[in-house]
Image: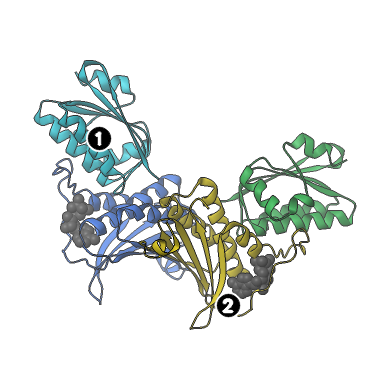
Chain colours: A green, B cyan, C yellow, D blue
Amino acid sequence: MDIKVQVRESEDDAYVVELSGEIDVYTSPKVKDAITELIDQGHYNLVINLEKVRYIDSTGLGVLIGGLKRVREHGGSVNLVCTNPQIRKIFDITGLVKIFGIFENEQDAKKALV
Amino acid sequence: MDIKVQVRESEDDAYVVELSGEIDVYTSPKVKDAITELIDQGHYNLVINLEKVRYIDSTGLGVLIGGLKRVREHGGSVNLVCTNPQIRKIFDITGLVKIFGIFENEQDAKKALV
Amino acid sequence: MNAATAAVGRIETVELRIPRKAEWVAVARLAVAAVANRLAFSVEDIEDLKLAIAEACTNCIRHTNGNASIDIVCEAEPDLLRLIVRDHCFDLPPQRPRAVGEPAGDAGGLGIFIIESLMDHVAFEPTANGPTELVMTKRVGA
Amino acid sequence: MNAATAAVGRIETVELRIPRKAEWVAVARLAVAAVANRLAFSVEDIEDLKLAIAEACTNCIRHTNGNASIDIVCEAEPDLLRLIVRDHCFDLPPQRPRAVGEPAGDAGGLGIFIIESLMDHVAFEPTANGPTELVMTKRVGA
Ligand SMILES: Nc1ncnc2c1ncn2[C@@H]1O[C@H](COP(=O)(O)OP(=O)(O)O)[C@@H](O)[C@H]1O
Ligand SMILES: Nc1ncnc2c1ncn2[C@@H]1O[C@H](COP(=O)(O)OP(=O)(O)O)[C@@H](O)[C@H]1O
């Protein structure tokens, strides 16, 4: 019932934020801080890996949407990696599949950034 | 949050009762029924395999103790297979380690019946 | 089973009260999952119920103030689970969520939309003593 | 931290009410585990707390009658969890458990013994309005 946030630098100035655990009203500020820090440092091409996320709710979605809005202001983008069908379903029902690039693995998500 | 009970015949008229799941006040009657049925059929040498049991409380212990008492009246015995340290600990603190044979695997538990 | 016979079925009630704080929402989620597990809900339905109760609790935290608790009543019938969520300072009339695909930023606006997508019936019901209740129902196998 | 500073620490309360029936004890177990997970308890301590609450609920089911509920109050302090379990028809004065290693058969007699082994402090406290409460406390890292 907690979240782990791991940030990794990748090729081409892209950054990967790997999340594992549960993203809810209690844990999402930690995710927000990590994303905000990257953006403040001038990194606008992000892959957020949700493969190890077992749970996400609207507070977690809000953080992802907020990040996307900020990087887009700088011509960047956020791609997601999501394989868990329950998590994927939440992006489907909220219509967020239309505004995020969602990929089956990190390689594809990184490639699609450029 | 449920229990699965599987009964297997073994060599030398021994029977193995393999339990998986949680044994509590709700599920223990199912365990009791399986053990009672074996004893009613005249099988007094039992191995009860708790390797896949994630939880047991005093109602589960009561069922095992009740079974042991009945088979002993017929010169039989009950050996347990228990590898989970949390489950093992409950047999330790209740002193039941002294009245049950507790083994690390089914082979040893079966051998010790004879 | 038609609606009339379902209505006379046995109802069992589990009640939970948590502090109106972010760190306790996980307790509501797990308790509701445990209740749902006693009915014949699928694993996917149980995930839906966890998300719906979390969204309801999150709204109580985000849209009310004070030290009050969040009260959750789970009414389990053989073929449905009704979740009633009540905060003690529900002063704003709930608004409709924003249009799908047009989220307004960090603030979201997705909570009630998600709840309505996952549950079979959702209603805000005014109570005699002030606060409004969110009542949401999910049928087994619906 | 000494006892005096701990006593003035923040206490957060989670309350749970379940039907006095075997199938709902698992809900108490999981809810208490979820509460304990919010404190700094080890995985092993959380298993102990699950077992202790289940034993307490099981006693409410085995030694009382009627349709009343079982009420559980979890008082979380930074360094301890206090669990208060109340049934509404606690009429028998609790007896001591049988001697260790001499169980009296199916009926057991192990419940309170297990609770006392796993928790740091256990008491039956009479209440003003009739029923007795079981109050049990476990310290983090004790
Ligand atoms: N428990 C509540 N107390 C007060 N207002 C609420 C509550 N739940 C929902 N609302 C109202 O309904 C609106 C829509 O809620 P929701 O769809 O969850 O989006 P969000 O919470 O992101 O604004 C909220 O903005 C709020 O005005
Ligand atoms: N909730 C309760 N209501 C009434 N009596 C109780 C309750 N809990 C415990 N007792 C009494 O305490 C005794 C010891 O309980 P316990 O150690 O759990 O063993 P057991 O339940 O197997 O008898 C019980 O036999 C009963 O008389």
Chain of residue at mark 2: C
Which residue shows up at 14% across the image and 35% down it?
A: B69
Chain of residue at mark 1: B
* Number of residues whose C-alpha sits closer than 10 Å to that of mark 1, classed few (under 14), some (14–19) or many (20 or more): some
Can you tell which of label 2 and label 1 is closer to the viewer? 1
Residue D60 position within the rendered picture, expressed as x and y whole percent measured from the top left? 26, 59
Nearest the camera: C140 or C13? C140
**Residue furthest out toward the right:** A75
Ligand 1 within 8 Å of the CB at mark 2: yes
Residue wearing tag 2: C90
Residue D117 position within the rendered picture, expressed as x and y whole percent measured from the top left? 28, 49
Residue D59 position within the rendered picture, expressed as x and y whole percent measured from the top left? 24, 56
Q: Is residue D59 left or right of residue C142?
A: left
Residue D74 position within the rendered picture, expressed as x and y whole percent measured from the top left? 40, 63
Residue A53 visible, this orientation: no
**Residue furthest out toward the left:** B73
Nearest the camera: D31 or D74? D31
* Number of residues whose C-alpha sits closer than 10 Å to that of mark 2, classed few (under 14), some (14–19) or many (20 or more): some
Amino acid at pointer 1: Ala
Residue wearing tag 1: B34
Q: Is residue A112 left or right of residue B84?
A: right
Which corner quadrant of the figure contains ligand 2?
A: bottom left
Which residue shows up at 83% across the image and 42% down it?
A: A14
Q: Is residue D84 left or right of residue C113?
A: left
B11 lies above or below D118: above
Which residue shows up at 74% across the image and 66% down it?
A: C98
Rendering quarter of residue B21: top left
Rendering quarter of residue D7: bottom left
- C-alpha gap between disc 2 and disc 1: 53 Å
**Residue furthest out toward the bottom:** C129
